[in-house]
Image: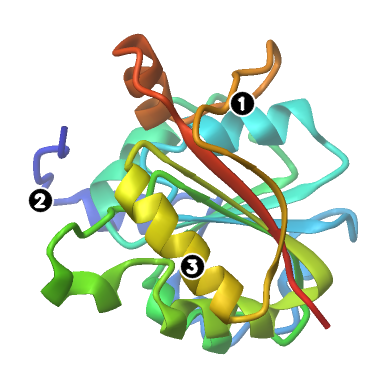
Amino acid sequence: MRLRRIPDAMALVHSHPLVVTEAAALTMAGCWQKHFATGNPLHLEIGMGRGLFLTRAAAAHPQHNYVGLERRAEPLLNALERLAEPYPANLRLLHADASLLTQIFAPNELDVIYLHFPDPWPKSRHAKRRLTAPAFLSQYQQILQPAGHLTLKTDSAAFYHWSCANFQEAGWRLTRASEDWPLAPEEAISNYEQRFRAMMKPICYAELEKQI
């Protein structure tokens, strides 16, 4: 369900101490670790939505630093409203568009990228908007470290197969894959995954490694 429009959402989001605006992010390539107390591995979720996966992952894994990118202000505001002080030291939220990734992050700056339930854009004329389209894969290859990892989750089998074909053509190495991914007891999941599993829908999963 799409969140209703909130007139002052952008102002509220941009005033929060955990949020990095797009304008600020465009000056930060290569300097993201300055936002964190430690230089731990940097993980990015693209299209974090309401942030359930990201906030749970950050709480469960303090040995990693997490950035959640979302282009819409309303989901970010929803995520922020569920966070209590003291805020997680290993979490930052980025209000920006994914098309700017190579301007926001330096080459090899990231260790892991998560694409969890991105919009599958089912109409063929919208294929270039999919986050696993070749233009996006090229950006991921630039900003991930050598042998960096990317994980994809989706409830759409058609989108999953289309995406895996694109990854293979682009030279990524598939390390784990399933069209019915079992949920581990302590696995952090997103709002979408929570909903789809309640509907008994199979979850497609792929873990890929960037080839040097």
Q: Is residue 64 above or below residue 203?
A: below
User: Circle 2 sits on which residue?
Assistant: 7
Q: Are marks 3 and 2 in contact (CB under 8 Å)?
A: no
Label of residue 188 in the image: 1
Question: Relative to the observer, which residue lies in front, 61 or 196?
Answer: 196
The kind of residue on which mark 2 rests is: Pro
32 left or right of 204? right
Foreground mark, 3 or 2, reads 3
The answer to whether residue 141 is seen in the rendering is: yes
The kind of residue on which mark 3 rests is: Ala
Q: Determine the secondary structure under disc 2.
A: loop
Label of residue 93 in the image: none
- Which x, y percent locates residue 174? 69, 58
Foreground mark, 2 or 1, reads 1
**Picture quarter containing residue 56?**
top right
Q: Are marks 2 and 1 in contact (CB under 8 Å)?
A: no
Q: Determine the secondary structure under disc 1.
A: loop
- Which x, y percent locates residue 46? 48, 58
88 left or right of 146? left
Which residue sits at x=67%, y=79%?
A: 171
Q: Can you say which quadrant of the picture contains the N terminus?
A: top left
- Which x, y percent locates residue 150? 65, 58
